[in-house]
Image (cartoon, helix red, strand yellow):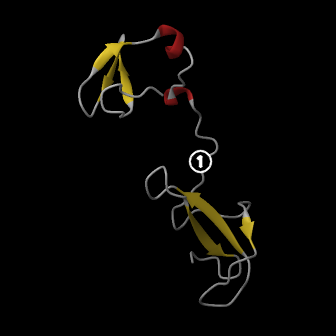
Amino acid sequence: MQFCDECGSMMHADGDEMICQSCGYREPKDQELAESFVSTEDQSDDDVIETEEDANFEGKPTADDVVCDECGHGEAWYTIKQTGAADEPPTRFFKCQKRKSVA
């Protein structure tokens, strides 16, 4: 990641330049630094967790520190999803193992 010398915002690559989306400041891309950047295009999605209501939770991580509001059962499968900004903690979604419905 590279930050703008003018305003401190994160810069993005555009060809051979780094551009600040906030103030428009441009500078040539530092080739030595650019070689250490990671592109998200090459990342796999095999670690993505299903969070749809009808998703098959079987085999997903389990939690025994929650209680179902409807039946009182104390074990649930859970999934994790980033619902807010990246600097906020992710949200856990639970599915009661007894009722097999989202809690």
Residue 85 lies, in percent from the top left, at 43, 53
Q: Is residue 54 above or below residue 16?
A: below
In this rendering, position of residue 89 left or right of residue 72: left
The C terminus sits in image quarter: bottom right
* Residue at image location 71% in from the left, 86% down from the top: 73
* Total number of numbered discs in the rendering: 1
| Side (left or right) of 17 relative to 73 | left
Residue at image point 71% right, 60% down: 60
Residue 46 x %, y %: 63, 41
Going by the picture, which residue comes out furthest to the bottom? Answer: 71
Q: Above or below — where is 92 with respect to 30?
A: below
Residue 95: x %, y % from top left: 62, 73
Q: Residues within 10 Å of mark 1 (few under 14, many from 20)?
A: few
**Residue under label 1:** 48
Q: Is residue 56 visible?
A: no
Near-viewer residue (5 or 70): 5
Q: Residue at x 23, y 26 (%)?
A: 24
- On the question of residue 13 being in view, the answer is yes
Q: Amino acid at mark 1?
A: Val
Kindly identify the residue that appears in the image at 73 percent across and 67 percent down.
62
Quarter holding residue 75: bottom right
Note whether 17 is above or below 21 in the view shown.
Answer: above
Between 59 and 94, the one lying in front of the other is 94
Residue farthest front in this picture: 6
Left/right placement of residue 79 relative to residue 65 reads left
Which structural element holds mark 1?
loop
Of all residues shown, which one is farthest toward the left?
24
Residue 68 in the image, given as x and y percentages of width and height: 64, 84
